[in-house]
Amino acid sequence: MLATTYLGVVQVPAINALASGTRRAAWIPAVAATSGCLVGLATVAVLGPRLAATGVALGYLVGSAVTAGVPVALVWRAHGMRWAGPLTRPVGLVAAACAVGMLVPAGPADWAAAGGALLVALAVLHRDLCRLRRG
């Protein structure tokens, strides 16, 4: 769910860029959302019977990745963005947080793990956050 939420948030600026462009570009988010839905449902159809709720969650994640990935990739390419570092660092942190969430048992240890993850995230993203603050 964390990764899916991240994908939902990351796509917002790209969708805004497409919606404020040409009519042709404004259709891209709708086509991406429909494609993501179909890919997600197909994933659930394949994985759901074997993995149950986990298969449904994976279908949701895959569908969200398609829905978010298409607009982000097209805007990235159209505007010649050089954000490989600022994008891969947060994606890596979300992946690491998901892994820690699966490995740490529920209880007091998960609060400690969350605090540690926050400190690591702040250390990794410090330079990017300072650049954003300066404008």
Image: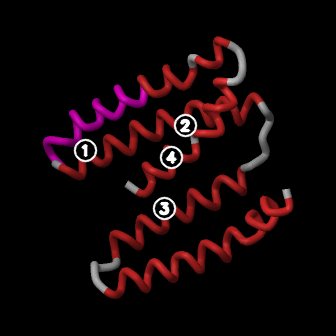
Q: What element carries label 4?
A: helix
Name the residue carrying label 3. Answer: 95
Q: What residue type is labelled 3?
A: Ala
Q: What residue type is labelled 1?
A: Val
Identity of the residue drawn at 40% across and 82% down: 111
The region drawn magenta spans 35-51
Q: Position of residue 19 (x, y in %)?
A: 64, 24
Q: Categorize mark 1 by other alpha carbons within 10 Å: few (<14), some (14-19), many (20+).
A: many
Name the residue carrying label 1. Answer: 56
Judge whether 33 appears above or below 51 on screen. Answer: above
Residue situated in front as seen by the camera: 45 or 4? 4
Q: Position of residue 23 (x, y in %)?
A: 65, 12
The reply to whether callout 4 and callout 2 are in contact (CB within 8 Å) is: yes
Q: What residue type is labelled 2?
A: Gly
- Please report whichever mark, 4 or 2, sits nearer to the chain's N-terminal start: 4
The disc at residue 8 is none
Name the residue carrying label 4. Answer: 7
Q: How far apart are marks 2 and 3 (CA)?
A: 16 Å
Identity of the residue drawn at 49% across and 20% down: 31
Name the residue carrying label 2. Answer: 69
Image position of 36 (left or right of 118): left
- Please report whichever mark, 4 or 1, sits nearer to the chain's N-terminal start: 4
Q: How far apart are marks 4 and 2 (CA)?
A: 8 Å
- Chief SS of the magenta region: helix
Check if residue 124 falls in the magenta segment. no
Q: In which quarter of the image is the C terminus?
A: bottom right
Image position of 59 (left or right of 79): left
Residue situated in front as seen by the camera: 113 or 21? 21
Q: Distance between the residues labelled 1 and 2?
A: 20 Å
- Please report whichever mark, 2 or 3, sits nearer to the chain's N-terminal start: 2
Judge whether 86 appears above or below 47 on screen. Answer: below
Q: Position of residue 24 (x, y in %)?
A: 64, 12
